[in-house]
Image (cartoon, rainbow, N blue to C red):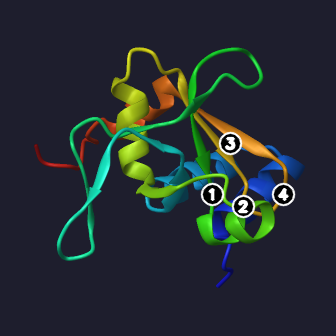
């Protein structure tokens, strides 16, 4: 298996834009660890972990169309090697979807590839749809 699965899907999508390719990207994003620029106060615990005081957030960008989106990086380890320390935390994609879906000042997520200078956007409405329970899930 590739060490950059999300970035690989992004590269494929950049070449041939298909609905199936975008859906694969969304599902893998949801289950991946994603790099972000964490904002807020973080403290060390006695056990070497980090905790937030309730003010932890994700940095945003208005790149492209001027609309505010969470700034994210696919395949964080590869992104560090390729682009240096452009982020300072890793978060589950599912958590970023929740943040984008519920933040009134956010229009979605801008995901940068970890291996190429390309990006893909996830709209707020797409994040909200992804978080809605399906007919097969029990409440």
Left or right: residue 104 versus residue 44 is right
Closer to the chain start, of discs 3 and 2, is: 3
Q: Quadrant of the N terminus?
A: bottom right
Q: CA distance from mark 2 to mark 1?
A: 5 Å
The numbered mark at residue 114 is 2
Q: CA distance from mark 1 to mark 4?
A: 10 Å
Against 128, is 112 above or below? below
Within 10 Å of the Cα at label 3, are there few (<14), some (14-19), or many (20+) other Cα atoms? few
Q: CA distance from mark 2 to mark 4?
A: 6 Å
Q: Are marks 2 and 1 in contact (CB under 8 Å)?
A: yes
Q: Secondary structure at mark 2?
A: loop
Q: Residue at x 62, y 65 (%)?
A: 75
Q: Nearer the viewer, residue 50 or 82?
A: 50
The numbered mark at residue 19 is 3
Q: Residue at x 72, y 61 (%)?
A: 114
The residue under label 1 is: 74
Q: CA distance from mark 3 to mark 1?
A: 20 Å
Q: Which of the two discs, 4 and 3, sits closer to the camera?
A: 4
Within 10 Å of the Cα at label 2, are there few (<14), some (14-19), or many (20+) other Cα atoms? many
| View extreme (bottom): residue | 1
């Amino acid at each position: 298996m590739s060490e950059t699965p999300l970035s690989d899907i992004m590269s494929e999508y950049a070449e041939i834009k298909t609905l199936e390719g975008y859906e694969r990207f969304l599902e893998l994003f949801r289950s991946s660890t994603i790099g972000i620029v964490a904002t807020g106060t973080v403290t060390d615990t006695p056990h070497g972990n980090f905790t937030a005081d309730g003010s932890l957030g994700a940095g945003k960008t208005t790149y492209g169309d001027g609309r505010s989106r969470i700034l994210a990086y696919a395949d964080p380890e590869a992104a560090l090697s390729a682009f240096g320390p452009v982020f300072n935390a890793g978060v589950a994609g599912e958590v970023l979807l929740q943040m984008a879906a519920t933040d009134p000042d956010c229009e979605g997520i801008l995901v940068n590839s970890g291996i190429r200078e390309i990006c893909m956007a996830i709209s707020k409405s797409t994040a909200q749809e992804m978080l809605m329970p399906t007919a097969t899930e029990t409440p």
